[in-house]
Amino acid sequence: MKKIFAFAVLMLSLQIGFSQQSIQKKIQTQLIMAENGSVVNLDEGTFTFTNSLSMEDKKNIIIRGKGMNKTILSFKGQTEGAEGLRVSNGENITIENMTLQDSKGDLIKTMNVKGITFTNVKVEWTGTPSEKNGGYGLYPVQCQDVMIDNCVAIGASDAGIYVGQSKNIEVKNSKAYHNVAGIEIENSVYASVHDCEAYENTGGVLVFDLPDLVQKKGGFCKVYNNYIHDNNFLNFAPKGNIVASVSDGTGILLLAASNIEIFQNRIINNKTIGTGIISYYMTERPVTDTAYYPYPTAINIHDNEYQREHIRPTSKGRMGLMFRLKLKFGKDVPHIIYDGIIDPKTLDAQGNMLADKKICLKNNKNQSFVNLDASHGFKGISRDISKHDCTLEPIKLVGNEK
């Protein structure tokens, strides 16, 4: 009897294995054979894959599941490839109504796509967040006209929702939690992040400009009407990643970013930094890219609400080290932290920042501020906000923002 039972279990396992291989082959064939202007429909159910799925050189394609948490593509047993789904060199591609889980690398990567839309998509690594998780959940890079709407990202060891080296971007109505970075805009222009919730990440929303990338400079980004709270999750990024230096307890972090407007956000209970404005020099990494601009300029932060519990900030990461060794704010950490490293070319003859390059802070509820004077070894740390009591012209976007 035991032998018969074991044989039956073996046969059932083989049938399931053959069935999953058949489904994997079917879906990949659909993606390869899809004609421009068609819809690739995915059934309801949980389907496991050992290989990456891919589609390239397609136009006006919809990849459609039956709904978030209804169509689930799992890459937990992946043995070949890195991404879950990769779409490249396309135009007007929509991915909607599905969940992708547990790829070795990025869950959905789109590259060189003009017109990419993610709607009602969840990307997640199940289980305890780990540095072994893939880097990015949603990962459009070198794309144009990017729309991310009503999506959820969980467990990324870099950024849950990430848009890099792209143009004309809108991220809205989405949630990111238990990632190192919840939402990140990097080296991208004309971006808006609004009506999102970023919580229980290491850092809630990041806007970064980094060196040594194809698209050299981002900017003209708006972050508004978001709920950015309780981003106190321990950093689990692999060592060496730029986000590995982000301190747990970070709400919004601007790194070498210019022409940024942050307004009407609720920035609540991020224990270390409500909003940080820092130059690339604070990372203490060398800059060899001669086309790179390492300073934050033209930052307009207004009409936000800040709150935090009266507790000590983290002692981990670059900022945590400074809090412990140099800054010593105790539990009285200002909500807005500016490193004070200034490009001399942005100063007038009197040593004041040019009007269109200023860091402006206005009408923020519970506003508190510190200039770290990092360029002078933190010798002139100041809470005087008067030089930043100014306004800038609102950021004007082009592209797909309504």
Image (cartoon, rainbow, N blue to C red):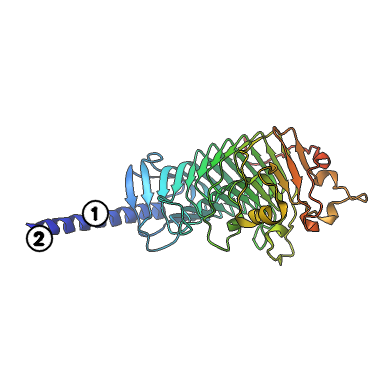
The answer to whether residue 400 of the structure is visible from this angle is no
Q: Is residue 211 above or below residue 167?
A: below
Residue 91, given in percent of the width and then of the height, sits at 53, 49
Q: Name the residue under label 2.
A: 3
Asked where in the image residue 369 lies, by quadrant, the reply is: top right
Binning the other alpha carbons within 10 Å of mark 1 as few (below 14), some (14 to 19) or many (20 upward) gives few
* Three-letter residue code for mark 1: Ile
Looking at the image, residue 47 sits to the left or right of residue 390; the answer is left
Residue 172, given in percent of the width and then of the height, sits at 56, 38
- Separation of marks 2 and 1 at Cα, in angstroms: 20 Å
Secondary element at image label 1: helix
Secondary element at image label 2: helix
Looking at the image, residue 322 sits to the left or right of residue 348; the answer is left
Q: Name the residue under label 1.
A: 16
Nearest the camera: 256 or 149? 256
Residue 208, given in percent of the width and then of the height, sits at 65, 52
Looking at the image, residue 192 sits to the left or right of residue 70; the answer is right
Point 80% across, 53% down: residue = 342
Query: Quarter of the image containing the N terminus?
Result: bottom left
Q: How many badges with numbers are in the image?
A: 2
* Three-letter residue code for mark 2: Lys
